[in-house]
Amino acid sequence: MMLSRHGLGAAVVAALSMGHAAAQTWTSCNPLTTTCPPNTGLGMTVDVDFTKGSVNSFVASGGGSVTYDPKNGATFTVTRGGDAPQLASVFYIMFGRVEMTFKAAHGAGIVSSFVLQSDCLDEIDWEWLGADPTEVQSNYFGKGITTSYNRGAFHQTPENQNSFHTYVVDWNANRIVWTVDGTVVRQLGYNDAEAGQYPQTPMQVKFGAWSGGDPSNPPGTIEWSRGPTDYSKGPFSMNVKHIKVTDYSTGSKYTYGDHSGTWQSIQADGGKVNGNLNGAGALTTTAVASSPTTAGKPSVPVGGVGGDTTAGASQYNLPPGWFMTSEGKIMPIGAAGSVVPPIAFVGVFTLMASVFGLGRFWM
């Protein structure tokens, strides 16, 4: 999707929302209208420690930079207009749990984002605005319908720019739960979502930072992000130490069986939708926060990372002889079942292209 499709403050929704959303909502192939390639299924749990460096199952894109160090893990830095560094998974999950240890970027107009999104534009979000270190926003959208921005909620959090906290989205066919440091801040039941809007199709994982307050953005985007952004006060950086992703299904590929966009239509190649649900463990929480707040706040728009044009992960289907480790590394199987040491992402897929004749496989 075009993850710069943010925001319309309450004062400008009526004037700008239709054209803004239509122009900036993006998917490379929408299964609601056409037959698309299958999505690469995770079908397991990966536990990625970014303090140890990058892994090739998350692809970098956007302007700006993503760097790695033992203290802060992956650092996403915005220094100028157009910077929107992000990582996107090469895999999808069909229901699941994503846990991220994270520190938000500071700065008026700077947005730190975590997004689950499907090819038919179902979406679940966390977003942090650099202008407010005590608040996080949750949101959901279904099937790319962005004619209203009333699904978001605001939650008080501890200081989120100077210390790391753990944020979780736990998503199944019946409900979505957002937690912060083990405290439930929001729960959305299937029947509580707007009609036809409950997210229920295979999701890719994306996270990064961007400038909603850039002067080139629409006025509604700048207003929502509490910009404008003053780049002289940068650089602006968000950090991700750790991410753990559990797929509640067990397929190697997920295919849309029809154009309905319902979870019952999704087919799992070599596995089963919800095949890992019972083994995933119960949602662990320590408390339930007070009701989320919306009063006096501008509407919460569709989430994301500005400028993203990351294609769907179906192009990354692994050929025979390659597999993903529990640490999120894509590796070849060596002789006698041994594993060849991991190599860089470009090297992996360049080698795949050479050995398997896959041409532009990894682009």
Image (spheres, rainbow, N blue to C red):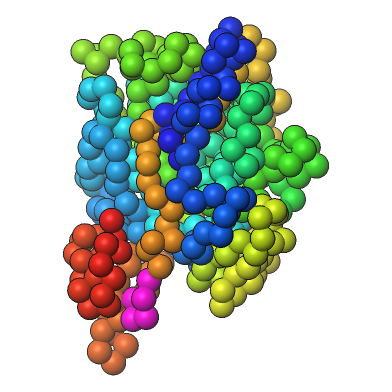
- Magenta stretch: give its range: 318-322
Q: Is residue 117 magenta?
A: no
- Residue displayed at 56% across by 43% down: 121
Residue 53 visible in the picture: yes
> For the view shown, which residue lies furthest in the front direction?
34
For residue 321, above or below residue 331: below
Residue 66 percent location from the top left of the image: 25, 41
Residue 150, quarter of picture: top right
Q: Nearer the viewer, residue 23 or 275?
A: 23
Location of the C terminus (image quadrant) = bottom left
Residue 63 percent location from the top left of the image: 25, 34
For residue 2, above or below residue 321: above
- Residue displayed at 29% across by 38% down: 62
- Residue displayed at 36% across by 33% down: 307
Q: Nearer the viewer, residue 129 or 93?
A: 93
In-image side of 151 versus 323 (left or right): right
- Residue displayed at 63% across by 68% down: 267
Residue 3 percent location from the top left of the image: 43, 34
